Every structure is written in structure tokens, then in C-alpha cells.
Image: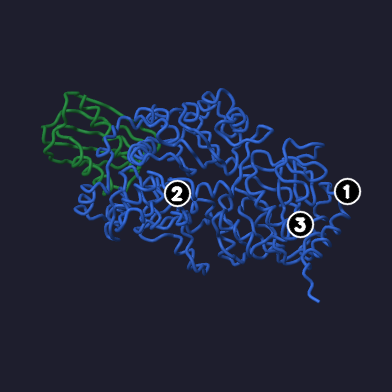
């Protein structure tokens, strides 16, 4: 297993008031994303547990793009990865952010 | 005095030699090797019917069993290298030279044999190109073909998988060649005459029915959410915007996802009757829901698909069928339809480079081309307008009087940025280049040239290459949808954002696509069993797709 943590400051807080959301499943090629509204509105933290080592730079890029594109301020995001490809990670993060907007 | 009928004399001698092994035109299964050894001559050009789907497998086994001392150095001209026997003949020396089109199932072995110099390769063709050469400089001396049944006069019923047979027989029979057909059984009267008996010289009742490859069945259960997201982008950003009514779909899961979204997402976008009404397409099981939902007006088919026969029989308003009720397919004519009468080709590929060239060749596999390069190219012989074609032509730019500006066919590559095992789809240099160098080909086997590609759709967005005005814009547009591959991460971010501002690149959010919709619940059918239900029980999936 590899554990990764990325902390970002962001100008766009996540809208809505949903305290917590979970999407996806830990399965081969898939991932589970837990989002919690527990941080300051200008902070976003993403922690990743992945069985696949050596892709830290790709995770960093995917997370940075997510924070830059989506309203993610205030969210602590925990990812249980099942060896998902970057496209699945990006989609799951976008879906999680939408769930928090409800 | 000149002899103008040497070919006919040779043909008469071959037929006389063959008749000694036959009763009329009918040859017993046990005598096929003797028949072939009587009819064939060393160095003959032979078309062994290996189609995309249907295989003259009994005749292939018989050819491989011939004595290489008697029959050798054949020049094989055939569209598909599909069965092991198709390559065995090159190992034994029965065959020496090869001109072909598609080699999907034998892609790894043919690559090894090419590297080892065991095959003298003429060229890898597209289907139409090879068929064309059957009539110019690759006319067969002998054709070995397959049908469902025949009568004793040789009248042949090909059934739903007519495929290449009429083209092969036309080229062989009318140019002094010999045509040998294997059939599943010999009958008193065929259900319909697909090939008239006077074009068939010998008929063999095979020991088992000919093999058909279920090449176009995609299990909806394997469609991923990323593929659904890409399909949504294609429907909203391309089908709807260009109003594409006449089209061809490739064989991959991306286009299967589009087919499965037509009755759900397509309906929601109000696209029924406005897109995807007329098709050049094999009878894809995944199109059943769209047909049943009333999206599809008609489909012409290259071949059939295992399990679709009963469904097709009950939908004659949609499909081309004969007096017997079953499908009539024809690869040459359907390829022509895909080339000239369709406004869009959309399909997948394994590699795309920075200029948009694409290839399905990897260093260990040579899959050939099949028909995609015909469908996926802009035909300069086209002269009829359509709104879709003209809109694409306007986007491609050009100056002068609009009445002199030709349109463009849309050629769309639908790919995920990473393939199986995290192999990147986007590359700096195609593996096809390395293959060409290694085996000394003058032309690298490129599936679709970059200048024919109009759009690339990935999970990151749509790149509209028609709107790019120079090579640098084109490269950045491609990098801009290449995701987290090295090519994608090598983008110039400022240039990509500038392309996005000009709508050359569009993200899902630019298209108003809701990420939560990218869910398997959006598929009209989520399993093969769902497809059976949609078809009212008429679709009969092959055993390997039945998991209930």
C-alpha cells in the first residue's frame, strides 16, 4: 500500500451544505471516495490509500486539476483506491463534488 | 497465330481434372484434398474465403493438408487471416506470398512470421482496396468459398453472412478462374439463390458447419462509467451539433455505449429522428434498444452477427432481407456505402500520435486494417451535399465562393486516454513506425491518417481538429484531451486554455454534462439478458455471452 496526502488552498468553496457523501466502490479498477465538509472554506485535503505504488506524480496532477476545476473548498476527501485509472479517479471526484452540492 | 484463350484452356483442364474426383459438381468431403491437388497449380493466386466473420474453414484445412511437393508457392489473396490454417500454409511452403486486409485473431502470429521472413508480404489493404485489386492485378485463379447450402447445380445460398462471396466469385469466375464452394449441406432447392450455379464449379458438403466469428457482440455489463461519459460527450457535442443521420460505428465499447445511450440520453436530448437514422453497420446487438425505441430507420450490413438472425427476420423494415426472409449482407457494397453515403465514421484505436495519425499495430501484433480506413476517410469523389457534410467543410475553413467549397466527412476517434494495463493511447511515435522499419515496409501501417481525423473524444473532452489552423494548434488540441498520459501532461496549459476559449477543446462542463449522469443506470441495457428482453426474445446470444 502507498499513502498519499495533498493539501491545497482554494478560492472556491464547495456550495451546498451536505456534510458527507460517499461514491464508488473499492473494486478492481474502481475506487471509493468519501467527502466530508470539515475544513475551512479555503482548504481542501485529499488522502489516498492505493495498492499501486509509484504513481504519486499522476495522483498529484489529478488532484491539482480537480481542485483547480471544481469547487472543493472545505472538503476533506479520502480515497480508497482499487487500482483505478486516472480517468476513473477524475470522474469519481467530479461526482463526489456534485453530491456535496445538494 | 495468337492464342487468345490460354486462360480458358487452363481453366477447362483444371475443371476436367477436378471432375474426375466429383459426381457432377459435387465432391465428397473425403475427396477435397485430392480435388484441390487436381485443380491447383504451383504459383496460383488463390482466394481462400476468410472474411471478417464467415470462414471457409473446411477448405482451409484441406488446403493445409495438400502435399507441398505438388502444391507450393501459392499467392494467397484474401481479406481475413483468421484461422491457424491461414498461416500454416506459409510454414509448409504451400503458400509463399500474401496480400490481405485483416488479421485480428492471428495478429500476434502473423507479426512473428513477418519478422521471421516466413511470409512474402505484398501489402496490407483496406477491404475495398483489396476487392478492387481482385479485378485489376490480383485476380484469383482459384477461389475457395463458403455458403450455407447449395443444390447439385451449384446454386448457392450464403445465408445472412453473404459478406465477400459475391465479390470473390465475380472476380474469379468471370476471369477464367475456378470456384469451389464448401456448404453445410447439399439440398434439392436452396431458400434463395445468392450466387447462381453457373458461377460455381465444385460443391463440397463440409464435415461441419462453417465457422463464424461473433465479432460485433459487446456485453453491456462491461461498459464502464468513463465510456458512458465519453459517449455522452459524443452524443451532445457531435451527434446533436452536426445532426448526424447517416453513419457507421466501429466495433469498440465506446460506440457500444453510444448505441445504448440513444434511447435514454439521446431521447432526453430530443435526438430521436434527428440523428443515427441510417446506418452502414453490422447488426450490433447493442443497437437493439435504439431500434426498438424507434431511432433507427434502416441498416445495411457488411455481414451478419451470430444470434441476430431471428431478430433481423422480424424487422424487415430496418434490415435488407431476401425472399427467404433472412439478411442479405454484402461487404463490398456496404463498404462503399460507408465511404460515400455516410456523414460520419466514429471508432476507437490503440494509438494516436501528435499529428492525429492512428494505428492498431503494436510491436507484437499486426491486426491489419479491415474497413476502418475506408469508412474513416474523407472521400474526394463525393459530390452530394448534406447539412452535416457542409457544416464540417465550413469549419475546416478555406476561402472563395461557397458553391466551390466541398464538405468534409466527420471522422471521429473515440478513445480512453489509457488502454488496458495503463498503456497510454496517446504517443509521440506510433509503434507502426517501428514495425515498418523492422520488416522493411515502405509505408507504415497507419489506420487513419491525421488529416482525415476531424474530432478526438476522450474522457477529458472533445478536440475539434477541423477548427485548428496549423500543426501547433493541432498538437496542443490533441495534448489537451490526452489526460494524464505523458503526451497529455506535456501540454502548454496557456495554449490549451486558449483553444478551449475558441471551442476547439470542450470539457464535459463546457458541454453542460452532469458527471452524476455518467452512471451505468443510464444504459438502456445493462446486460446481454437485457438485450434479449428488448428484442422480445428474438436475439439469441451465443453461448459464451450467456451467463444466466
**In which quadrant is the C terminus of chain B drawn?**
top right
Chain that bears disc 3: B
- Residue receiving disc 1: B23
| Tag 2 secondary structure | loop
**In which quadrant is the N terminus of chain B drawn?**
bottom right
The number of numbered badges drawn on the structure is: 3
Q: Is residue A72 left or right of residue B218?
A: left
Q: N-terminal of the two: label 2 or label 1? A: 1
**Residue B82 percent across, percent down from the top left:** 62, 50
Chain that bears disc 1: B
Number of the label disc, if any, that sits on residue B178: 3
**Residue B331 percent across, percent down from the top left:** 59, 47
- State the blue chain: B
- In the rendered image, residues at marks 3 and 2 fall on the same chain: yes
User: Color used for chain A?
Assistant: green
- Residue receiving disc 2: B384
**Residue B191 percent across, percent down from the top left:** 73, 35
Asked if labels 1 and 2 touch by Cβ distance under 8 angstroms, the answer is no
Amino acid at each position: 500500500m502507498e499513502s498519499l496526502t495533498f493539501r491545497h488552498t482554494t478560492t472556491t468553496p464547495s456550495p451546498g451544505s451536505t456534510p458527507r457523501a460517499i461514491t464508488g466502490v473499492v473494486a478492481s479498477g474502481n475506487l471509493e471516495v468519501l467527502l466530508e465538509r470539515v475544513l475551512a472554506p479555503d482548504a481542501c485535503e485529499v488522502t489516498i490509500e492505493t495498492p499501486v505504488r509509484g504513481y504519486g506524480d499522476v495522483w498529484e496532477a489529478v488532484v491539482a486539476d480537480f481542485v483547480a476545476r471544481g469547487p472543493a473548498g472545505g472538503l476533506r476527501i479520502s480515497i480508497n483506491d482499487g487500482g483505478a485509472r486516472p480517468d476513473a479517479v477524475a470522474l469519481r471526484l467530479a461526482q463526489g463534488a456534485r453530491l456535496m452540492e445538494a | 497465330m495468337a492464342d487468345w484463350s490460354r486462360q480458358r484452356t487452363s481453366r477447362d483442364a483444371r475443371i476436367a481434372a477436378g471432375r474426375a474426383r466429383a459426381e457432377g459438381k459435387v465432391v465428397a468431403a473425403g475427396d477435397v484434398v485430392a480435388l484441390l491437388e487436381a485443380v491447383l497449380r504451383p504459383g496460383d493466386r488463390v482466394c481462400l474465403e476468410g472474411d471478417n466473420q464467415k470462414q471457409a474453414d473446411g477448405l482451409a484445412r484441406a488446403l493445409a493438408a495438400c502435399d507441398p511437393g505438388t502444391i507450393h508457392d501459392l499467392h494467397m489473396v484474401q481479406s481475413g487471416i483468421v484461422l491457424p490454417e491461414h498461416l500454416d500454409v506459409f510454414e509448409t511452403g504451400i503458400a509463399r506470398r500474401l496480400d490481405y486486409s485483416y488479421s485480428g485473431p492471428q495478429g500476434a502470429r502473423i507479426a512473428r512470421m513477418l519478422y521471421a521472413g516466413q511470409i512474402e508480404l505484398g501489402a496490407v489493404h483496406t477491404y475495398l482496396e483489396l476487392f478492387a485489386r481482385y479485378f485489376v492485378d490480383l485476380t484469383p485463379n482459384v477461389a475457395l468459398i463458403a455458403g450455407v447450402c447449395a443444390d447439385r447445380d451449384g446454386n448457392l445460398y450464403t445465408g445472412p453472412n453473404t459478406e465477400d462471396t459475391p465479390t470473390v466469385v465475380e472476380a474469379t469466375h468471370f476471369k477464367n478462374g475456378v470456384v469451389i464452394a464448401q456448404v453445410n449441406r447439399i439440398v434439392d432447392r436452396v431458400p434463395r439463390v445468392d450466387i447462381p450455379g453457373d458461377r460455381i464449379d465444385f460443391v463440397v458438403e463440409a464435415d461441419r458447419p462453417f465457422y463464424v466469428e461473433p465479432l460485433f457482440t459487446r456485453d453491456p455489463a462491461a461498459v464502464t462509467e468513463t465510456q458512458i461519459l465519453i459517449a455522452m460527450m459524443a452524443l451532445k457535442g457531435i451527434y446533436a451539433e452536426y445532426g448526424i443521420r447517416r453513419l457507421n460505428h466501429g466495433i469498440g465499447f465506446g460506440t457500444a455505449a453510444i448505441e445504448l445511450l440513444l434511447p435514454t440520453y439521446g431521447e432526453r436530448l430530443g435526438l430521436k429522428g434527428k440523428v443515427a437514422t441510417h446506418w452502414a453497420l453490422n447488426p450490433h446487438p447493442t443497437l437493439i434498444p435504439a431500434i426498438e425505441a424507434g431511432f433507427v430507420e434502416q441498416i445495411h450490413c457488411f455481414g451478419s452477427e451470430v444470434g441476430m438472425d431471428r431478430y433481423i427476420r422480424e424487422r424487415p423494415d430496418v434490415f435488407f432481407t431476401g425472399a427467404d426472409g433472412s439478411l442479405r449482407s454484402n461487404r463490398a457494397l456496404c463498404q462503399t456505402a460507408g465511404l460515400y453515403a455516410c456523414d460520419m465514421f466514429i471508432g476507437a484505436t490503440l494509438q494516436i500520435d501528435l499529428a492525429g495519425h492512428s494505428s492498431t499495430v503494436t510491436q507484437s501484433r499486426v491486426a491489419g486494417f479491415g474497413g476502418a480506413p475506408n469508412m474513416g476517410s474523407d472521400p474526394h469523389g463525393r459530390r452530394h451535399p448534406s447539412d452535416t457534410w457542409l457544416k464540417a467543410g465550413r469549419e475546416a475553413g478555406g476561402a472563395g465562393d461557397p458553391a466551390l467549397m466541398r464538405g468534409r466527412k466527420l471522422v471521429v476517434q473515440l478513445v480512453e486516454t489509457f488502454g488496458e494495463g495503463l498503456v497510454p493511447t496517446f504517443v509521440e511515435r506510433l509503434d507502426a513506425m517501428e514495425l515498418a522499419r523492422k520488416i522493411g515496409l515502405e509505408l507504415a501501417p497507419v489506420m487513419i491518417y491525421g488529416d482525415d481525423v476531424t474530432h478526438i473524444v476522450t474522457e477529458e473532452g472533445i478536440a475539434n481538429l477541423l477548427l485548428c489552423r496549423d500543426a501547433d494548434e493541432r498538437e496542443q488540441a490533441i495534448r489537451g484531451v490526452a489526460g494524464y498520459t505523458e503526451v497529455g501532461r506535456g501540454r502548454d496549459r496557456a495554449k490549451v486554455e486558449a483553444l478551449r476559449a475558441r471551442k476547439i477543446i470542450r470539457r464535459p462542463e463546457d458541454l453542460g454534462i452532469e458527471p452524476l449522469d455518467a452512471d451505468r443506470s443510464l444504459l438502456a441495457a445493462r446486460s446481454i439478458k437485457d438485450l434479449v428482453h428488448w428484442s422480445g426474445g428474438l436475439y439469441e446470444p451465443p453461448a459464451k455471452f450467456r451467463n444466466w
